[in-house]
Image (cartoon, rainbow, N blue to C red):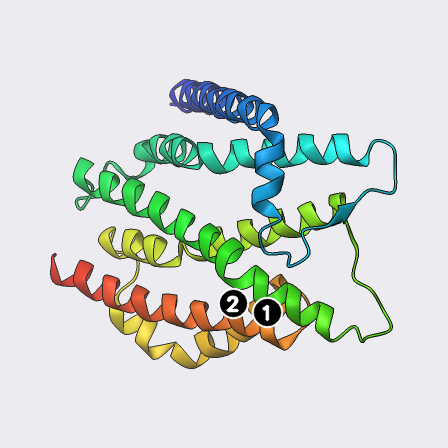
Amino acid sequence: MANTIFQSLIDNTRDLRKRLLWSIISILIFAGAAYYYRGYVLDFIQRPLTDKRLIFIHPTEAFFTYIKVSLFVGLLVSAPFILYQIIQLLIPYIKDNEKYSRGFLSSIFISGSVFFYLGAGFAVLGVLPFALDFLKGISGENVQATFTVGNYASFVMLFTLIFGFVFEMPVISYGLAKLGLIDKKTLTSKWRIAFAGAAVLAAVLTPPDPITQMFLWGPLLLLYGISIVLVGLANRGE
């Protein structure tokens, strides 16, 4: 018995290492391509800026920013592949569940990828322009807003990832419901907690201004509502 458990742990560790290695390779390949087209990538993340002007105050800042942004693009493009690797790692733990099926995993993979990119796109193209204008506006007329390329890129990357992961809420909820771990009644009975939790989460994950926080708080509540609908559909299909 002990030998069987030990061998299972070794096999799982080997599988984890293999899938982690393939994920890293995927990120590096796309990061290399992004670095080659780094000028276009930087132009794209500058779109939310009205003046399109960035500076650097350290000799290596621009170079390392290009590296960071390239790796970030590699992560974004590889997100579906990484999600696939995560799903494959979870299969041994959920395959004995009577509700497990390949169709279920396919729906999680497709919807998870779509919702992640919807969140990332909403952050960059929808929220950031308003957030930046608001933050510059409240600084006053006596202060000129000039961002360094490193700080600005880090801000955009963090913002994008936050919204990308937050938009996975309906997918995760649907998956848990299909596996019989949550139901619609659980979510609807906890709406007050969700309402307050969304406000706290928005305050923690976004810059300290009410406009940006509202742009995350609103979608969080909407996503929670979508999660309730999807969980209800998952429970009905049982």
The foreground one among 97 and 190 is 190
Q: Residue at x 58, y 51 (%)?
A: 47
* Residue to which mark 2 is pinned: 216
The residue nearer to you, when weighing 192 against 11, is 192
- Above/below status of 49 relative to 189: above
Residue 124 in the image: state x and y as whole percent. 53, 54
The type of residue carrying mark 1 is Thr
Relative vertical location of residue 70 with respect to residue 98 in this rendering, above or below: above
Q: CA distance from mark 1 to mark 2?
A: 7 Å
Label 2 secondary element: helix
Give the residue pinned by disc 1: 212
Q: How many marks?
A: 2
Q: Is residue 125 left or right of residue 57?
A: left
Q: Residues within 10 Å of mark 2 (few under 14, many from 20)?
A: many
Give the residue type at disc 2. Leu
Foreground of the two, 187 or 199: 199
Identify the residue at horizontal 62%, vertical 39% (top origin). Answer: 42
